[in-house]
Amino acid sequence: MRNIVFVTGNPHKVKEAREILSPLGIAVEQNNCGYPELQEDELPPIAAFGVGWAANKLEQEVMVDDSGLFIEALNGFPGPYSAYVFDTLGNNRILKLMDGETERRAIFKCVIGYCRPGEKARVFAGEVAGEIANGSRGSAGFGYDPIFEVNGVTFGEMGEDEKNRLSHRYRALVKFAEWLKQGH
Ligand code: ITT
């Protein structure tokens, strides 16, 4: 079993990463030390900078996860600002912004960053297309899960297994695991 330190303050991400990666022979250990998040329009440079910073600070190989919900009708908002917007507005205010809007498509994106001290950061991106639900439904998961639906079912209504088989995070983590398996 390979052990990788996951720098994140979000225990839900760690739980999902464990469920997805442990069958692939990768164990994940959380470190809550945080890292600086660049202001960028897209997630990969944020993850790359953050993971490089954390690898050098902790002097060991680490991974990070930068995720965001990109809503089509809102020109990609909240995107890279998803954590701030979730904390300040929350799901109900997002639903209000979408009131009466028929274009409800959204993309949930996840970028996994990985780095060893002194080396170049690697990023692995995954995304899933879905829609913003008409209301908040389901209590599973975390964050935007109750308002993001795929084929009419919100992540909040799905069992963990179901979300972890199709999520943005699953898709990014599988790419990461495949790359590690190639001997990196
Ligand atoms: P770290 O940066 O410490 O890893 P965070 O929760 O701040 O934790 P992000 O910067 O990636 O993470 O924030 C993305 C926001 O989107 C945040 O509010 C998350 O709760 C939310 N989010 C991320 N992945 C999600 C998922 O799978 N389902 C629902 N919401 C998610």
Image (tube, grey):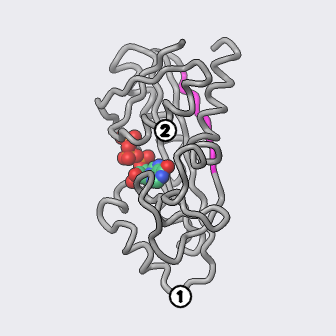
Task: Name the foreground residue: 27 vs 102.
Answer: 27
User: Which residue shows up at 59% across the image and 64% down it?
Assistant: 153
User: Which residue shows up at 54% across the image and 24% down it?
Assistant: 22
Return the residue found at the far bottom: 100
Q: Label 2 sits on what residue type?
A: Glu
Label 2: which residue?
A: 16
Ligand 1 within 8 A of label 2's CB? yes
Q: Please provide percent x and percent y for residue 169.
A: 56, 42
Q: Is residue 33 magenta?
A: no
Q: CA distance from mark 2 to mark 1?
A: 33 Å
Vertical position of residue 163 compared to residue 22: above or below: below
Q: Depth-wise, is mark 2 or mark 1 nearer the camera?
A: 2
On the question of residue 39 being in view, the answer is no
Query: What's the magenta region?
Result: 120-127
Q: Quadrant of residue 182?
A: top right
On the question of residue 113 being in view, the answer is yes
Q: Secondary structure at mark 1?
A: loop
Residue 79: mark: none
Q: Quadrant of the C terminus?
A: top right
Q: Please provide percent x and percent y for residue 170.
A: 60, 40
Label 1: which residue?
A: 100
Q: Main secondary structure of the magenta part?
A: strand
Task: Name the foreground residue: 47 vs 13.
Answer: 13
Q: Label 1 sits on what residue type?
A: Gly
